[in-house]
Image (spheres, rainbow, N blue to C red):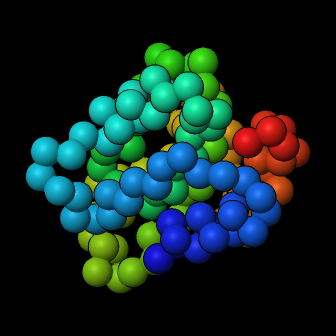
Amino acid sequence: TLGYEVCLSLTKAKIGQSSFVCLGRDPFVGTDPVAIFSLLAKDTATKIILYLTETTFATDDRIINWIAANPLQPVIVYVADNPTKEYAELNAAVLTAQEKKERFQQAGAYIVESPQYIAGFIKQKIGTNL
């Protein structure tokens, strides 16, 4: 739901989206988030990559490494703190939201603290020709 809400807010702010990929907690078997990032990076119409994640997404380490190795395209990241108790046990095995934000930032990503700030952040930091 968050992804759809962010897309709507970007559309209302007159910021276009070339693609929207939702992996969710149960991605299709064989879907590789890093491959999706690579495809987006090769698309000349893609000006930025916006990544919405949670503390429990285990693939984030691979994405952090991809961002560090591919600094040509801006990546904006929002890390939602784990919103459900059903994943509370996983929090012991993964990074906290703050730790993930720091790792993404160290890799070169921009961090947005709330979904409501994404459109404004894009216009302010990245530009309005999107």
Which of these two is toward me, 80 or 125?
125
The quarter holding residue 10 reads bottom right
In this rendering, is residue 120 above or below 87?
above
Q: Position of residue 74 (x, y in %)?
A: 64, 31
The quarter holding residue 117 reads bottom right
User: For this view, does 125 lie left or right of residue 28?
Assistant: right
In this rendering, is residue 62 above or below 30?
above
User: For this view, does 54 lie left or right of residue 45?
Assistant: left
**Quadrant where the image shows the C terminus:** top right
Identity of the residue furthest to the right in this view = 124
Residue in view at x 56 percent, y 25 percent: 44
In this rendering, is residue 82 above or below 77?
below
Which of these two is toward me, 38 or 100?
38
Residue in view at x 12 percent, y 52 percent: 29
Query: How many dots with numbers?
Result: 0
Which of these two is toward me, 66 or 103?
66
In this rendering, is residue 109 above or below 4?
above
Q: Position of residue 120 (x, y in %)?
A: 82, 56
Residue 116 visible in rendering: yes
Q: Position of residue 45 (x, y in %)?
A: 58, 33
Identity of the residue furthest to the left in this view = 29
Residue in view at x 68 percent, y 39 percent: 110
User: For this view, does 39 lie left or right of residue 122?
Assistant: left
Residue 109 visible in rendering: no
Q: Position of residue 32 (x, y in %)?
A: 24, 40
